[in-house]
Image: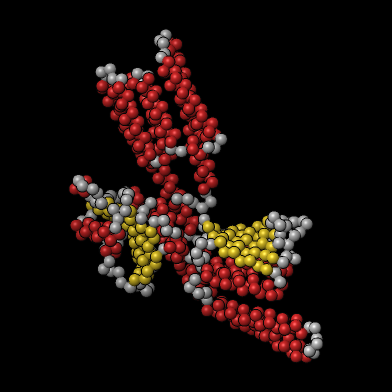
Amino acid sequence: MRVRGSAPSIDASLAADALMVGRMRLVLSISALLAITVDAADSHNQVPATVWLAFLGYILHSLLIHVCTAVGRPYFQGRTIHWSDVLWFTLIVAVTDGTHSLFFLFYFFAILTSSFRWGFEEGARVTIASVASFTACGLATCTGDTSQLLMRTAFLLALGHMIVYWGGSKLALQRRLALLGDVSQLSNPRFGAGRTIARTMERTLAFFRASHCILLTRDLATGTWLLRTLREDDTCEQVSIETIGRLAESPLMALAPDSVVLSNRLPWPLNHLRAQHRVFEAGTTAWRSADEAGAAHCTTIAALLEARAFISAPLPMRLGEGRVFISSRDGRLGKSDALFLAHLMEQIFPVIETIEVLDRMASEAASTERLKIALDLHDTAIQPYIGLRMGLCALRKRAAADNPLREDLDKLADVADGVIADLRRYAGEVRHGANDDPGGLVRPHLERQAARIKGLYGIDIDIVMAVDGPLHLDDRVTAELLQMVSEGLNNICKHTHARHGSVRIDCKNGQLALCIENDACQESFTAFHPRSLTERAAALGGQAHVDRCANGGTAVRIEIPI
């Protein structure tokens, strides 16, 4: 799970870890060669050539990895390296007395690096491979000391398991902290409660690597249920929302209201040896097996979700009730996953309810303000333009047929008609609010504005929407976006001699990028910050800056996290 803005720091941390491991590998290989040299000098024994070749080869191998890691080669920071270590350690153990070789301790280096960098599963595979390699070397060079082989194998397996378990726990804790930090950043009132819930479902689904995330909520005031569903590989914009009148008879709500549920469909014969359905109730400190009725409900839910495993937790809502379900068709989910899901919901849903209250208050206040603005527009903007239109018509009638200003007066009258029509349309939109898809108003509004600028100033404005599919924005962000575009285009008309401009809107990686360019060539360029645009972008959590284009014009770039 990536946290927005933290990917460079995570990559830098992984590169630093890889460099440290490469340095320690080089120190380990050199120390082993020195130990062999000192031991040969003290015992006056002849060291076979194969031993020297094995240790010298491992030193060259370690030096190559260290140098390539230092210069930033990504291949030498991957999982293949610790598997090559296992092969080298097996060769070293094989040429140094097999079972009696103290260099079997080298296997712990590969187990440590794999588990603390890649998690429990990778560390477990390396541990099993290390035990199997050491056992094979011991059996191939066995001199009758089977007890030492069994003792060292058991020691390698037991200590390796502990290392792998702690390494996996460390990575799991890091991932959970990253998810909690990511979710806390999503809790922003300007996004609205619906988008915050959708982004939380998306992050949670990716964290558990599950197939479905289902969220059931009920508003106590209305009594209606909302069913939100998100499948794997879907984005938060693809959350399916369905309103349901009654859900009391659904198996999804048949579980105990304050209990965390874990269900795993185990293969035969494990399904007869271990409980498949477990419940953690509020106020208790231990899991218990589900009773007969609860097990039947869990089986029904698993069949309904077409899942091999699922976890479910209640939603801590003050103004309603609900549950969240995370299901997986392939993998298994554990007790710690279920408890973490409950903890995650306890962190996010009180904030979401606060956002809903704020959003409702803001919507009611905005409705009243829209009515006032619509009346003010009619009295202070539309009426003066109507008077201007009447004055132009009067001048047009007084002008003689051969007057050279008749054509200009007709053009100004047409412009005034267009402005009056736009103001009336805008007043109607303000009074009645945005439509169901406020993001859908962006392109038509920009095209009308570009046409008006073309008629008034003769400046061609290109509108580029580099967005795959519809632009999903709430009404407030849409209004701010249109206002920023309007200000940027007005600056082009008033402060430049440009004959061509462009507006480009891009949305990717959780960022809304707005770029307003003009082709006015200027001999000198002075960096500046447009105060109004900068303040509007900052109010939305974004930033604005001005660059010089390659053709000598000016580009205003605005980035807003959505």
Q: Is residue 405 above or below residue 157?
A: below
Q: Position of residue 344 (x, y in %)?
A: 40, 55
> Could you say which quadrant of the image residue 502 lies in?
bottom right
**Left or right of residue 27: residue 283:** left
Q: Position of residue 366 (x, y in %)?
A: 54, 74
**Left or right of residue 4: residue 126:** left
Query: In the orientation shown, which residue stands out farthest toward the front?
Result: 402
Q: Position of residue 253 (x, y in %)?
A: 29, 64
Q: Residue at x 42, y 49 (%)?
A: 176
**Residue 262 appearing in the image:** no
Q: Is residue 23 above or below residue 148?
A: below
Colouring method of the image: secondary structure
Q: Residue at x 72, y 81 (%)?
A: 412
Q: Residue at x 42, y 31 (%)?
A: 84
Q: Is residue 81 above or below residue 277?
A: above
**Residue 470 appearing in the image:** yes
Judge by depth and name the residue closer to the eye, 8 or 362: 8
> Could you say which quadrant of the image residue 171 lies in?
top left
Task: Tally the marks.
Answer: 0
Q: Residue at x 47, y 50 (%)?
A: 2
Judge by depth and name the residue closer to the eye, 5 or 331: 331
**Left or right of residue 123: residue 512:** right
Q: Position of residue 510 (x, y in %)?
A: 52, 57
